[in-house]
């Protein structure tokens, strides 16, 4: 198969230091107690005066000067965004980290990049995709989030050894944005096919919940071009 696939397993395995707290020393606004967050380094120049005007038309700006801007997202999350002159974008949340929170944080990083592009940031689609793929996620608990990524131009047969741990949620994600079965790719875990009906989709890719399929021990992940 000529198409490169990336199979990614996301799992919350246990208990990651909340490095997001470092923003406390860089803003004067009183911050809530954040429990999760995400950050990327974009390194694009930003005119904070114009960004302040654009952001303020949509969100509540908490603080802004020539070196940074802080705003709160609208809606039910109440999450915060921080954009700094050194190129960092940070989003932070008062909710505990899990895969649903991770999805929201990734969307908010994307929204922050949209705001920067509105004021001439010129973040390309490739740079955006690369940044989101390498984003750092934070939790108030140590070691809670693990990601394994494998790229292949053909079928594969991999072994995953799961240590003794409390797996709260795990996903297998398929990239690019094509549903595995119709595109001719079929995934198996320990010889059992992941049925088409079990896959779901959002703007980041197709994914299937595999929480109950990878208890402690050794597991085989494989693909074929036909069932």
Image (cartoon, rainbow, N blue to C red):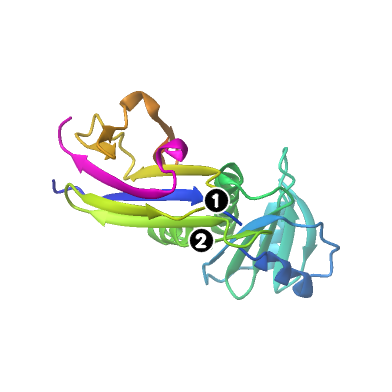
Q: Position of residue 16 (x, y in %)?
A: 61, 63
Q: Position of residue 194 (x, y in %)?
A: 32, 32
Considering only order in the chain, which callout, 1 or 2, is on the residue closer to the N terminus?
A: 1
What residue lies at 71% left-to-right and 50% top-to-bottom? Answer: 79
Residue 15: quadrant of the picture? bottom right
Q: Position of residue 121 (x, y in %)?
A: 53, 63
Q: Is residue 161 magenta?
A: no
What residue lies at 31% left-to-right and 56% top-to-bottom? Answer: 150
Residue 106, labelled with which disc? 1
Circles 2 and 1 in contact, beta carbons < 8 Å: yes
Query: In the picture provided, is 9 more to the left or to the right than 86?
Result: left
The one of 135 and 149 positioned closer to us in this rendering = 149
The C terminus lies in which quarter of the figure? top left
Q: As displayed, is residue 217 above or below residue 84?
A: above
Residue 66: quadrant of the picture? bottom right
What residue lies at 36% left-to-right and 56% top-to-bottom? Answer: 149
Q: Report crowding for label 2: few under 14, some 14 to 19, many 20 or more residues within 10 A (C-alpha).
A: some
Identify the secondary structure beneath mark 2: loop
Residue 125 visible? The answer is no
Identify the secondary structure beneath mark 1: helix
Query: In the picture provided, is 159 more to the left or to the right than 54?
Result: left
Residue 135, labelled with which disc? 2
Q: As displayed, is residue 135 above or below residue 157?
A: below
Residue 219 visible? The answer is yes
Q: CA distance from mark 2 to mark 1?
A: 8 Å
What residue lies at 19% left-to-right and 47% top-to-bottom? Answer: 3
Q: Please give the count of numbered marks on the rendered protein.
A: 2
Q: Which residues are magenta?
A: 210-227
């Amino acid at each position: 198969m000529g198409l490169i696939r990336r199979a990614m397993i996301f799992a919350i395995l246990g208990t990651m230091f909340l490095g997001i707290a470092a923003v406390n020393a860089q803003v004067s606004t009183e911050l809530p107690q954040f429990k999760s967050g995400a950050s990327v380094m974009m390194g694009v120049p930003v005119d904070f005066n114009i960004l302040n005007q654009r952001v303020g038309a949509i969100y509540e700006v908490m603080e802004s000067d020539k070196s940074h801007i802080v705003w709160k997202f609208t809606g039910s999350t109440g999450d915060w965004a921080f954009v700094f002159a050194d190129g960092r974008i940070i989003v932070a949340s008062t909710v505990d980290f899990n895969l649903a929170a991770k999805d929201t944080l990734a969307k908010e990083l994307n929204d922050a990049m949209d705001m920067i592009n509105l004021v001439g940031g010129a973040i390309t689609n490739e740079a955006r995709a690369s940044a989101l793929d390498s984003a750092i996620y934070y939790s108030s608990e140590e070691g809670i989030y693990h990601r394994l990524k494998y790229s292949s131009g053909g079928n594969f047969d991999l072994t995953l050894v799961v240590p003794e741990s409390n797996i709260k949620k795990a996903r297998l994600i398929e990239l690019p944005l094509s549903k595995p079965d119709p595109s001719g790719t079929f995934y198996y875990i320990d010889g059992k096919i992941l049925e088409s009906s079990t896959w779901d989709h959002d703007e980041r890719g197709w994914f299937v919940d595999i929480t109950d399929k990878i208890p402690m021990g050794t597991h085989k992940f494989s693909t074929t071009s036909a069932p």
